[in-house]
Image (cartoon, helix red, strand yellow):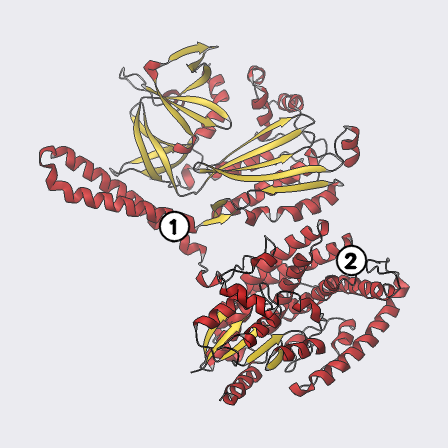
């Protein structure tokens, strides 16, 4: 059973994502910003992270960099969700270490497909 | 879209949650918009943007297309403000505030009827679009060498069309870039910018294809500007939350706090409070039983040690439980105060006044039901302040005052009560006018009027049917203002009174109990009957024989430490005459409505926690009684409403005389 950490400052978004993931059998943890998420990561073994970009108390980009530079958790695949499809932003997110950059609104089927392929790639 | 993945129950819960979250976010955005109007702050602007952005994202996810279109448009304007493309003026804030109001209205509709199709938002969409266009033209103007993004030239109608064209072209090219940039996501993109200038198309958002373009130019450098990865990680290692970079009033999203929070329906809390109330009554009975048993079997007291232990234990637990449930119902008054700056902003422009506002003690907590009940009176008081209190800038200058008026709100706890003060430095209350009005309308006897102190006379503004306003405005000035305010506050077992210095200031003071359901009371005997008096107003108890009671002008007074305190004979007021010759033995000194007064009673029984039970519909006209309660021995006693007894006193006396 794969464990996914959802990082988003909107309670509703977290809940929606979490419902969708749970319907597909994932175990879900939630964090409301980057700092919160880093704490969660140190506490539970996480297989995949879905992070929002724009959050108070450490935004998504900083969060991704932090994860990539931290021991133990640096290999966890990260999906970044954002409403912006700005090219520069996307490039920056990829450079920071994001595996997949997805734009909202989210298509549940596509999200679940993406998760599946990301988790399979993992050694 | 998300629907097929969710159970209908779950979807409903999520929508409820969406309503709560979005409502909070929009209320926050409205407050913040008013704040940055006077104190521009990039972080606050960011927060507004995030709030609207979240509402847009979640609403489109849930398929509320009108709402998400509107939020999207508002977000466009905010995004441009954030980038510094243009500096908003008054009218921009107006439009954004109206947009937030409309979003809130849509949210309320979703809460009630479950969809957002009831309200026509085309006008506000149009206005947002105009602001957007103005921002675009501001952008092109700022391309001039002068580094002044603040150029906001007035929009001329003929110019508008051209701007739209420009926008379309620009949008087109940008969208194309997007396609090339993100095509590996395997989805077709629409040039959304062009779509936008063609007007709203509800539904577009929801149907959006996988990864549908959602144009919000977010400058990359804005997002990265916070701490670098390394420092952020170090900070965590040191257990030091990076709060330094967030302003003090940052959203209550304190790190990982939410996880420990559960949202509970208020009805459940009410139910819990009711049960605790019953438990308190049961505890009172148990204590009484324990007491009588021990009295009866004094010699074999040790046999009852167990009963005594249990009683004490139950008492402690019940008290703690009661306190805990009460705390769970407490809400900071900021819930209420935060709405005031917006109200003051709107009213200032309505009345043509300039007003500064200061808020203090917004963290003071009050029972949720009281916060709600306080809303209307507070709005009324503030309207009054702005309408009749604070003068126009010209009038103020003529009086040698600052042209800008000052309004301040202050909340603090005082014992078991919460005090709320509303202060303005306006023209104050003209006592002479108040008395004149009362006389004209024949609301009071001449002799009584003459006997009133200045303060008492001022407080006549609270009697029904009186308005000293010169002209009638939309709200204040119809003489239904202040008496309704007082009635509402007294319904909450609270008090309200006014103090003022003519041409200088006015201060309204509201005192409220912490909670509605349970209070500490002093049980007294008046003639043969027992009554409860709220302990919050009791200052001290005095034995009658130790003090000097004098008669001044047919009214009894008591001299206490060189202070003359008027006495009220409760037996007379309540008409509980007795045949026996027993004398009243005690005086209860109370502080009510900013006045000190002594109540004569037969004897004082003791202090008890009482659960307030309303009298019920057909007894609601009974004067001087605030409710009833059940004592430990199962007997029902009445809780006296001392405030109305005191304020109705003058009339009562004139009848008796």
Q: Tell me the mark number nearer the camera, choosing from 1 and 2.
A: 2
Residue that badge 1 annotates: B325
What chain letter is assigned to the residue under label 1? B
User: Exactly how many numbered labels are in the figure?
Assistant: 2
User: As drawn, is B239 to the left or to the right of A62?
Assistant: left
Residue B198 sits in quarter: bottom right
> Does residue B66 appear left or right of residue B310 in this picture?
right
- Residue furthest out toward the left: B300
Question: Is residue B63 or residue B398 the one in the foreground?
Answer: B398
Residue B485 in sight in this render: yes
**Above/below status of B564 relative to A35:** above
* Location of residue B627 in the rendering, given as x and y in whole percent from the top left corner: 39, 37
Pick the quarter of the image with the N terminus of chain A: bottom left
> Do tags 1 and 2 sit on the same chain?
yes
Question: How far apart are the two marked residues, 1 and 2, measured between alpha carbons?
Answer: 48 Å
**Residue B378 x/y as whole percent:** 58, 41
How crowded is the residue under tag 2: few (<14 C-alpha within 10 Å), some, or many (20+)? some
**Relative height, residue B33 to residue A35 (above, below):** above
Residue B116 makes an appearance in the image = no
Which sits earlier in the primary sequence, circle 1 or circle 2? 2
Location of residue A40 with respect to B255 vertically, above or below: below
Q: Percent from the top left, x then y, of residue B147?
A: 84, 61
Q: Quadrant of residue B127?
A: bottom right
Near-viewer residue (B480 or B52):
B52
Mark 1 element type: helix
Badge 1 crowding class, 10 Å Cα cut-off, few under 14, some 14 to 19, many 20 or more, is some
Pinpoint residue B160: horizontal percent, then vertical percent: 86, 66
Element on which disc 2 rests: loop
**Residue to which mark 2 is pinned:** B87
Residue at 27 percent of width and 44 percent of height? B315
Chain letter of disc 2 in the image: B
Q: Residue at x 58, y 15 (%)?
A: B450
């Amino acid at each position: 059973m794969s464990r996914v950490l959802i990082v988003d400052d909107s309670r509703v978004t977290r809940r929606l994502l979490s419902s969708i993931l749970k319907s597909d059998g994932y175990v879900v943890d939630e964090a409301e910003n980057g700092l919160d998420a880093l704490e969660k990561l140190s506490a539970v073994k996480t297989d995949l992270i879905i992070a929002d970009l724009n959050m108070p108390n450490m935004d998504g980009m900083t969060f991704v960099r932090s994860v990539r530079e931290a021991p133990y958790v640096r290999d966890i695949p990260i999906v970044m969700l954002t409403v912006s499809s700005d090219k520069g932003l996307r490039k920056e997110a990829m450079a920071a270490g994001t595996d997949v950059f997805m734009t909202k609104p989210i298509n549940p089927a596509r999200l679940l497909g993406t998760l599946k392929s990301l988790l399979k790639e993992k050694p | 879209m998300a629907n097929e993945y969710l159970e209908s129950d779950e979807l409903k819960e999520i929508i409820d949650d969406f309503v709560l979250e979005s409502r909070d976010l929009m209320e926050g955005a409205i407050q913040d918009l008013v704040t940055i109007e006077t104190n521009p702050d990039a972080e606050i602007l960011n927060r507004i943007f995030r709030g609207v952005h979240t509402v847009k994202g979640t609403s489109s996810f849930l398929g509320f297309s009108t709402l998400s279109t509107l939020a999207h448009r508002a977000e466009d304007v905010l995004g441009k403000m954030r980038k510094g493309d243009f500096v908003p003026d008054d009218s921009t804030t107006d439009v954004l505030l109206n947009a937030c109001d409309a979003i809130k209205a849509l949210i309320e509709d979703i809460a009630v009827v479950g969809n957002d199709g009831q309200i026509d938002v085309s006008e506000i969409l149009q206005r947002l679009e105009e602001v957007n266009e103005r921002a675009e033209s501001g952008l092109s103007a700022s391309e001039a060498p002068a580094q002044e993004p603040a150029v906001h030239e007035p929009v001329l109608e003929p110019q508008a069309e051209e701007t739209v064209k420009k926008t379309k072209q620009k949008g087109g090219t940008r969208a194309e870039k997007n396609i090339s940039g993100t095509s590996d996501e395997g989805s077709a993109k629409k040039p959304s910018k062009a779509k936008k200038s063609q007007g709203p198309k509800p539904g577009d958002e929801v149907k959006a294809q996988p990864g549908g373009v959602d144009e919000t130019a977010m400058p990359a450098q804005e997002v990265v500007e916070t701490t670098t990865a390394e420092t952020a990680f170090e900070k965590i290692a040191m257990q030091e939350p990076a709060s330094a970079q967030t302003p003090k009033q940052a959203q209550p999203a304190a790190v990982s706090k939410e996880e420990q929070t559960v949202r509970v329906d208020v009805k459940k809390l009410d139910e819990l409070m009711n049960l605790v109330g019953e438990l308190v009554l049961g505890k009172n009975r148990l204590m009484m039983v324990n007491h009588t048993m021990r009295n009866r079997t004094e010699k074999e007291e040790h046999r009852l040690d167990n009963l005594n232990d249990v009683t004490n234990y139950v008492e402690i637990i019940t008290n703690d439980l009661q306190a805990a449930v009460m705390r769970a119902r407490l809400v900071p008054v900021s819930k209420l105060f935060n709405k005031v700056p917006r109200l003051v902003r709107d009213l200032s422009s309505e009345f043509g006044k300039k007003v500064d506002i200061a808020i203090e003690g917004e963290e003071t907590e009050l029972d949720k039901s009281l916060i709600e009940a306080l809303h209307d009176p507070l709005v009324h008081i503030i309207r009054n302040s702005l309408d009749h209190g604070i003068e126009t800038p010209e009038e103020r200058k003529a009086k040698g005052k600052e042209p800008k008026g000052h309004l301040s709100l202050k909340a603090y706890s005082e014992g078991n009560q919460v005090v709320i003060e509303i202060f303005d430095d306006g023209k104050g209350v003209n006592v002479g006018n108040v008395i004149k009005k009362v006389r004209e309308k024949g609301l009071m006897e001449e002799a009584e009027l003459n006997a009133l102190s200045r303060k008492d006379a001022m407080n006549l503004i609270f009697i029904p049917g009186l308005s000293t306003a010169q002209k009638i405005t939309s709200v204040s000035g119809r003489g239904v203002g202040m008496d309704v305010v007082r009635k509402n506050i007294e319904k909450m077992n609270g008090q309200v009174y006014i103090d003022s210095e003519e041409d200088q200031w006015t201060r309204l003071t509201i005192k409220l109990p912490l909670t509605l359901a349970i209070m500490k009371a002093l049980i007294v005997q008046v003639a043969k009957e027992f009554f409860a008096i709220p302990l919050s107003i009791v200052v001290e108890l005095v034995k009658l024989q130790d003090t000097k009671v004098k008669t001044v002008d047919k009214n009894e007074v008591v001299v206490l430490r060189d202070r003359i305190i008027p006495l009220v004979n409760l037996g007379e007021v309540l008409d509980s005459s007795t045949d026996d010759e027993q004398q009243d033995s005690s005086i209860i000194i109370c502080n009510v409505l900013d006045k000190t007064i002594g109540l004569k009673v037969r004897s004082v029984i003791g202090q008890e926690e009482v659960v307030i039970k309303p009298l019920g519909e057909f007894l609601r006209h009974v004067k001087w009684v605030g409710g009833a309660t059940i004592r430990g021995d199962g007997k029902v006693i009445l809780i006296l409403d001392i405030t109305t007894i005191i304020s109705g006193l003058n009339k009562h006396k004139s009848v008796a005389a």
